Amino acid sequence: MPELRPEHPQGCVSSEERPQGCVSSERSDTLAGDVLAGRRRALAKAITLVESRRADHRAQAQRLLAAILPHSGRSLRVGISGVPGVGKSTFIEALGIYLIERGQRVAVLAVDPSSSLSGGSILGDKTRMERLSQRPEAFIRPSPSAGSLGGVADRTRESLLLCEAAGFDVVIVETVGVGQSETAVAGMTDIFCLLQLPNAGDDLQALKKGIVELADLIVINKADLDAAAATRAQAQMKSALAMFRHPSPHWTPPVLTLSALLKEGMDAFWHEVERYRATLGVSGELAARRRHQARAWMWELIGQGLHERFRSNAAVDRELPALEAAVEAGTTTPAAAAAQLLDHLGH
Ligand code: GDP
């Protein structure tokens, strides 16, 4: 059953998925219908389309997204982050199966900008989440491997909407604990969960990088290795959290200890997620978070679009080297040079 496997990280998938060319010229309304019917092969194909950077594919992808948008928004979007080795895939697999056993359909996406450098992907390794990937109620998609964090995050945001339209109850977005990808994932999910190791120092790393501030829920994993150490780490994290104020006055991020390997603690974890959803749902904060995320995404795209337009402007290209040199030499102010270049974008 080829459709049960995690899909390729990018571009062309299997020959069954591309009857004519890399992404089929199948009309996006047919594809939209198939996605809405919950067909996983159509979903895989739709994601391949939104990941494509070809201009005609982008246009098709935007039509597709416009068609499915009214049917998106119904899933719970869960962000999972943590350094490599903390147990993210073990945890997501255990959680995914836990949820499936409770009648839910689960999609897993990833944001890993480093995959474009390494050529791999955090979900590209087929041995990861093997059991989950064999379940028909699950859909696992590796990180798009093309481009900058902005590009990777945009594609994942669009894929998330497609998964929702395909009827997945829970969409998990995984990211590695490097760079700015946590901010991107916290910015596209309803609840952002941070996985930590029970050894001293891990909490300091996360604190230093400002990731703890983003967390709505913190998990100390691998508690089976040393229960006392896990409890100590839990206490440390709780006191560290006291330094921050969660955006919601109704929520204090809980710190749980569990073992993904032994599948212990899934109940407690999901209970907290549901409590979060109920608490912030009633107060309207969850809806406000999504509104804010949608607006922020639009502004991010405006910023990216302006930047692209600027860089591809012929007059800017012509004048840039001389103006950069003049700024470096101190013969022109940065402000004057910037104003002259920006003038080429028109008013
Ligand atoms: P990721 O890089 O964050 O996705 O981490 P993995 O899920 O690949 O796990 C890294 C290693 O830690 C693997 O060898 C797992 O079997 C192991 N591991 C994950 N969770 C636990 C746990 O709860 N307890 C123990 N003892 N090992 C775990």
Image (cartoon, grey):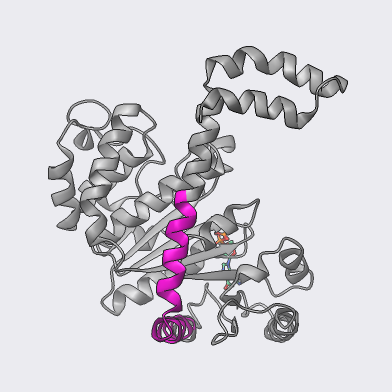
Asked which quadrant contains residue 282, the reply is: bottom left
The number of numbered discs placed on residues in the rendered structure image is 0
Q: Give percent across and percent down for residue 133.
A: 34, 58
Residue 287 visible in rendering: yes
Q: Main secondary structure of the magenta part?
A: helix
| 189 over 41 or under it: above or below | below
Asked which quadrant contains residue 36, the reply is: bottom left
Q: Quadrant of ligand 1?
A: bottom right
Residue drawn at x 46%, y 78% as measured from the top left: 285
As for residue 292 lying within the magenta part, the answer is: yes
Q: Give percent across and percent down for residue 346.
A: 51, 27
The answer to whether residue 108 is left or right of residue 343 is: left
Q: Give percent across and percent down for residue 43.
A: 25, 50
| 107 over 33 or under it: above or below | below
Between 166 and 264, the residue placed more toward the observer is 166
Residue drawn at x 39%, y 59% as measured from the top left: 108
Residue found farthest to the front: 347
| 23 over 97 or under it: above or below | above
Between 98 and 18, the residue placed more toward the observer is 18
Between 174 and 258, the residue placed more toward the observer is 174
Residues rendered magenta in the picture: 269-298
The answer to whether residue 241 is left or right of residue 251 is: right
As for residue 44 lying within the magenta part, the answer is: no
Between 246 and 343, the residue placed more toward the observer is 343
